């Protein structure tokens, strides 16, 4: 009996083991297939090098959009890169059928399009038609940033992104809004609690990790892969723009808290100064943009933006930063042409360059920044003694923001930048400021040799 | 683990002989067999553990991936939405209604929906409308039926309420003095037994369904003229119906969905919610040819007067050339009903947390609204500003198309810095003083009431120094101050293109409205071609005025200008009169003249360099202030300017309460 029992037990156990093994195999297979499903059948794509599903979905989507008269344009970076390579050919080619599917057939999870908010009427019919055509869609809405700066206004939330999914392909429609400063803005893609996190692999989206700022693009109607689409007229410059399009919203809530603590100066002088600083900044931005020189808000102007979303009325000037590698000899004549005479020029291109221009009662200071391995610095010079100063900053990159109705750069790592410059007490307004001693990050940097003074200290 | 597949006892019955041989072999080698058995057991255990671990691992991996895939995109805010109203399947509502001299309240299922014990306020019949399916309050009104005409308003309101709604009535203080027969009959038809006999200082509560059953009524008679009836408290139950019964069955379109949402929430808007043949909520007015205002944003400034807002938006959306996408309604306060109205029309609305009090609150609301408008439409060079209590004339937008004509030649407008605004309102445009719908004026005052603002003016000048919340100033008075206006002028039409119908408002009461607004002439002729657009430019306008004065016949200055016979019974002529005006700010005679002509006299409006233009008996009538006006030179030397005495004291006493009353309410 025992023997049989033991054998039976052994057999049973072996059977269980087999079942487990089979189960494990099945599970593994199931898991694999699920993964494959999510990445949209790589096998098929690699076999043919083509994915007609994608083409079909894009065609259907374009049909849907045009039936509702909604002008969208293609901003998919992968396709635009391909398009950019043969842009000449695409521009010149007429409507003949294209021999092969080059652009819309590469297997991808997404194709990205842009929509200008003001060009459509939020027509609900669109979604109903989309559903009839078999699309599933997701709308991502959020607060309207254009009202964020306003005291206590609560508008309706605005749509920032739409995703239309059909079969294994999804269309990502990014909604662009016009902002003060004559530029386009798109919002970040943030999912709310109840939303389906697996609707599409959100991490793979090209737009939406951060908000972005763009110039208004000129569009071109082209026919690629037998589909008529609008694309940015100059895809390469669009792609270039996209690579550093990150946008920072001003910290309006903190700014309001700041003004609660330190009420704003509404005196006639303050209003006048702000008005002049604003127009000076507009003029400077116009001049530098025309030259193609990248610049950002620095020092007091940057602090004003970060702390109170406005020009600090008791600051005496407008401060900009420029990387020395972007320096152009044309800068001085261009400003002079714009009606801003050079006030002084300290340092030289190789070391501690600093330019000052005289606006209408307000001075424009341009500091040139020198990049080292682990930090960035700019220099200062005391005219009467020839003393040199150095201001150190941690490394930073540039982001767009909106300031006094301008699209303008600020360091993305603004807090570090401001703290480096003004120390941990930057939140407290200081009215007496000495550029040689007050900054937190100032260092003595020797003295200019006397024989160079004529060159490195020029005062007009 | 793969190598374990050919586990020996896999298919025992098929390879019988091999199995037996193996078994035989094993039985002979006990030790080996035991070892095998233990080995097998151990292996099995290991397999099981490994398997379980694998399952857990893959699970976790899958879960992590999913988490990861979206975590960058998670909203930082954890919007855990707690349903505000727990699903209530209860079919019966407990209703409590209280009526007394100094206090009324209504509670529905223990929630107080009306409570009024303020002194000297809320006298009359309070009416509450409940949704018969949900029990939600759809409308709350009070009709001061102690005063005349309020009962008519109540009848109008009750007639607008849909059949089947639950109506709750309660009286505070006194509600019968001016409750006329018609109103009593309406109440009777609702099922009230007491209403026909309601008398002086009676207390009364009533709950009933419109066109249906009565849920309860209580009444306390006033024993004597000098005393009030005893307080009454009515407790009753109301049976709810199903949602389907409470709704109309309109065809399922987007518009009707909006309508349905609106009509199940609020009451008192009449035919927009009628089941049969409801009034449209989308209007497709003819497009304007060459429309220059299509892209001009329209800011509608609203408070909590949803009925006015409703009427105003209807009128606005029916105006030729309107672009609903450019309209934003700014609501001062978190009021639901105005927002419902905005949503009914599919427009966008923005609510504004009230800042400060009284006039300063209005002023802050204006500032926020204007700033937001220019933020939302950064391309716009102008904005149209409207208030909720304005009716838009059929061709209101015509006036603005003139503005946009200017806007197309921005350089011209920027050269002509002498323009401050364009307004649709003529302060002096009364029935008897306005005539020509195609005529425009330049005036030194800023009338408001439907006007167009230039962005640069707002952004560069007004916004930075707008009165702060602690300054209790009127924004429009502030804008009219010389520091702001800087001598610039507004363009106005002879016949106003907007109409002021608000009676309840900060600066409005019935008397004030009657006296100063009701007789205003309001343009109803569509498609008016404005004639003197070009001549409105600064220099051209002077030429035009000189031409007019040259052509004008001087009136007989020996007659009394207040008399009708002062102006001859002619038509289409131009007349001029000269009044005394010692310096620029001397309006003594003008104010007296305005008073006797029955036009705006509370302050000086409509002047242009000491000249006023209006119509009398269909003749163009010019008034020149001598010697302050530069046009004084046109006065023939034989004519002595007319001087009119400032008011005698008792006259002044009459005028003052009107202003005071206007400011109080």
Image (cartoon, rainbow, N blue to C red):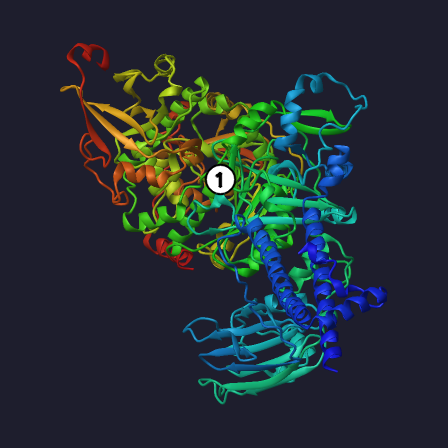
Q: Chain of mark 1?
A: B
**Residue B191 versus residue B626 in the image, above or below:** below
Residue at the extreme bottom of the image, as rendered: B223
In the picture, measured across the screen, residue A88 lies left or right of residue A98, that is: left
**Which image quarter is the C terminus of chain B in?**
bottom left
**Residue B1 versus residue A388 in the image, above or below:** below
Q: Which residue is mark 1?
A: B375
Q: Is residue B110 visible?
A: yes
Quarter of the image for residue A63 reads: top right
Q: Where in the figure is residue B600, as x and y percent of width and height?
A: 45, 45
Which residue is painted at 72% across and 36% down in the image?
A69
Residue closest to the eye, B106 or A404? A404
Q: Secondary structure at mark 1?
A: helix
Which residue is painted at 33% across and 42% down in the image?
A307
How crowded is the residue under tag 1: few (<14 C-alpha within 10 Å), some, or many (20+)? many
Residue closest to the eye, B643 or B537? B537
Q: Where in the figure is residue A404, as x and y percent of width and height?
A: 40, 34
């Amino acid at each position: 009996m025992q023997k049989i029992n033991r054998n039976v037990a052994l057999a049973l156990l072996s059977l269980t083991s087999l079942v487990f093994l089979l189960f494990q195999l099945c599970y593994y297979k199931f898991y694999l297939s699920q993964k494959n499903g999510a990445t949209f059948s790589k096998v098929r794509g690699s076999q043919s090098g083509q994915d007609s599903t994608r083409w079909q979905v894009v065609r259907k989507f374009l049909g849907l959009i045009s039936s509702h008269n909604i002008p969208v344009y293609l901003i998919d970076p992968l396709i635009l890169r391909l398009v950019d390579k043969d842009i000449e050919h695409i521009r010149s080619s007429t409507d003949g059928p294209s021999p092969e599917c080059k652009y819309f057939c590469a297997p991808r999870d997404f194709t990205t399009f842009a929509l200008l908010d003001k060009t459509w009427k939020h027509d609900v019919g669109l979604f109903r038609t989309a559903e009839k055509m078999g699309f599933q869609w997701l709308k991502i809405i959020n607060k309207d940033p254009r009202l964020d700066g306003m005291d206590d206004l609560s508008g309706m939330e605005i749509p920032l992104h739409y995703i239309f999914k059909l079969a294994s392909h999804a269309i990502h429609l990014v909604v662009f809004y016009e902002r003060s400063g004559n530029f386009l803005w798109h919002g970040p893609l943030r999912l709310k609690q109840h939303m389906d996190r697996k609707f599409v692999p959100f991490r793979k989206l090209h737009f939406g990790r951060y908000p972005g700022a763009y110039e208004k693009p000129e569009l071109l109607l082209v026919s690629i892969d037998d589909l008529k689409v609008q694309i940015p007229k100059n895809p390469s410059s669009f792609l270039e723009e996209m690579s550093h399009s990150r946008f920072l919203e001003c910290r309006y809530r903190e700014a309001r808290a700041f003004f609660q603590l330190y009420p704003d100066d509404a005196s006639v002088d303050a209003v006048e100064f702000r008005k002049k600083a604003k127009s000076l900044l507009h003029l400077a931005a116009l001049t530098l943009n025309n030259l193609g020189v990248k610049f950002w808000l620095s020092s007091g102007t940057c602090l004003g933006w970060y702390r109170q979303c406005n020009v600090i009325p008791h600051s005496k000037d407008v401060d900009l930063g420029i990387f020395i590698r972007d320096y152009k000899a044309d800068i001085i004549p261009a400003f002079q042409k714009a009606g801003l005479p050079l006030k002084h020029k300290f340092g030289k291109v190789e070391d501690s360059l600093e330019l000052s221009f005289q606006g209408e009662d307000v001075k424009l200071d341009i500091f040139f920044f020198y990049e080292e391995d682990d930090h960035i610095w700019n220099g200062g010079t005391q005219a009467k003694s020839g003393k040199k100063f150095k201001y150190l900053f941690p490394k930073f990159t540039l982001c767009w923001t909106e300031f006094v109705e301008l699209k303008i750069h600020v360091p993305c790592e603004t807090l570090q930048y401001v703290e480096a410059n003004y120390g941990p007490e930057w939140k407290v307004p200081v009215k007496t400021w000495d550029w040689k001693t007050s900054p937190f990050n100032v260092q003595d940097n020797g003295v200019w040799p006397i024989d160079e003074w004529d060159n490195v200290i020029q005062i007009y | 683990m793969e190598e374990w597949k050919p586990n020996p006892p896999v298919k025992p019955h098929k390879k019988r002989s091999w199995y037996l041989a193996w078994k035989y072999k094993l039985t002979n080698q006990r030790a080996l067999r035991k070892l095998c058995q233990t080995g097998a057991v151990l292996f099995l255990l290991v397999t099981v553990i490994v398997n379980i671990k694998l399952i857990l691992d893959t699970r976790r991996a899958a879960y992590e991936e999913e988490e990861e895939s979206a975590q960058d995109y998670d909203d930082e805010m954890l919007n855990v939405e707690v349903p505000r109203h727990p699903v209530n399947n209860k079919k019966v509502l407990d209703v409590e209604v209280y009526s007394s001299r100094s206090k009324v309240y209504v509670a529905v299922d223990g929630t107080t929906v009306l409570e009024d014990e303020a002194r000297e306020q809320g006298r009359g019949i309070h009416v509450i409308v409940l949704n018969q399916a949900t029990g939600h309050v759809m409308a709350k009104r009070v009709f001061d039926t102690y005063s005349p005409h309020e009962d008519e308003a109540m009848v109008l309101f009750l007639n607008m309420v849909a059949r089947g709604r639950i109506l709750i009535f309660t009286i505070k203080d006194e509600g019968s003095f001016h409750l006329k027969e018609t109103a009593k009959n309406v109440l009777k038809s609702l099922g009230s037994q007491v209403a026909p006999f309601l008398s002086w200082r009676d207390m009364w509560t009533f709950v009933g369904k419109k066109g249906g059953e009565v849920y309860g009524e209580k009444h306390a008679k006033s024993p004597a003229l000098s005393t009030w009836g005893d307080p009454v408290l009515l407790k009753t139950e109301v049976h709810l119906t199903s949602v389907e019964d409470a709704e109309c069955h309109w065809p399922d379109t987007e518009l009707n969905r909006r309508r349905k949402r609106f009509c199940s929430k609020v009451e008192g808007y009449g035919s927009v919610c009628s089941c049969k043949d409801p009034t449209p909520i989308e209007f497709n007015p003819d497009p304007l040819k060459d429309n220059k205002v299509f892209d001009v944003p329209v800011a509608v400034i609203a408070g909590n007067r949803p009925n006015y807002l409703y009427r105003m938006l209807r009128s606005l959306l029916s105006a030729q050339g309107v672009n609903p996408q450019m309209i934003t309604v700014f609501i001062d306060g978190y009021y639901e009903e105005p927002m419902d109205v905005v949503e009914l029309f599919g427009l966008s609305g923005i609510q504004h947390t009230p800042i400060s009090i009284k006039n300063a609150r209005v002023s802050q609301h204006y500032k926020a609204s204007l700033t937001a408008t220019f933020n939302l439409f950064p391309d716009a060079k102008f904005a149209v500003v409207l208030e909720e209590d304005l009716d838009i004339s059929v061709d209101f937008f015509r006036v603005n198309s003139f503005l946009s004509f200017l806007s197309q030649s921005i350089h011209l407008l920027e050269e002509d810095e002498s323009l401050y605004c364009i307004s649709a309102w003529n302060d002096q445009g009364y029935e008897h003083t306005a005539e020509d719908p195609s005529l425009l004026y330049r005036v030194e005052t800023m009338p408001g009431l439907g006007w167009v603002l230039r962005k640069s003016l707002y952004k560069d000048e007004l916004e930075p120094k707008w009165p702060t919340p602690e300054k209790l100033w009127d924004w429009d008075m502030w804008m009219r101050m010389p520091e702001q206006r800087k001598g610039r002028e507004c363009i106005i039409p002879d016949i106003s293109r907007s109409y002021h119908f608000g009676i309840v408002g900060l600066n409005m009461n019935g008397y004030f409205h009657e006296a100063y607004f009701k007789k205003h002439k309001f343009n109803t002729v569509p498609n008016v071609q404005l004639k003197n657009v070009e001549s409105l430019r600064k220099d051209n306008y002077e030429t035009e005025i000189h031409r007019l004065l040259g052509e004008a016949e001087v009136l007989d200055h020996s007659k009394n200008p207040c008399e009708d016979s002062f102006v001859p019974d002619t038509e289409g002529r131009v007349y001029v009169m000269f009044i005394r005006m010692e310096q620029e700010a001397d309006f003594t005679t003008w104010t007296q003249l305005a008073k006797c002509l029955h036009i705006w006299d509370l302050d000086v409006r409509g002047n242009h360099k000491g000249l006023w233009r209006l119509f009398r008996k269909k003749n163009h009538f010019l008034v020149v202030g001598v010697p302050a006006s530069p046009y004084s030179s046109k006065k023939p030397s034989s004519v002595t300017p007319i001087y009119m005495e400032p008011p005698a004291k008792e006259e002044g006493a009459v005028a003052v309460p009107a202003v005071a009353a206007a400011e109080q309410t």
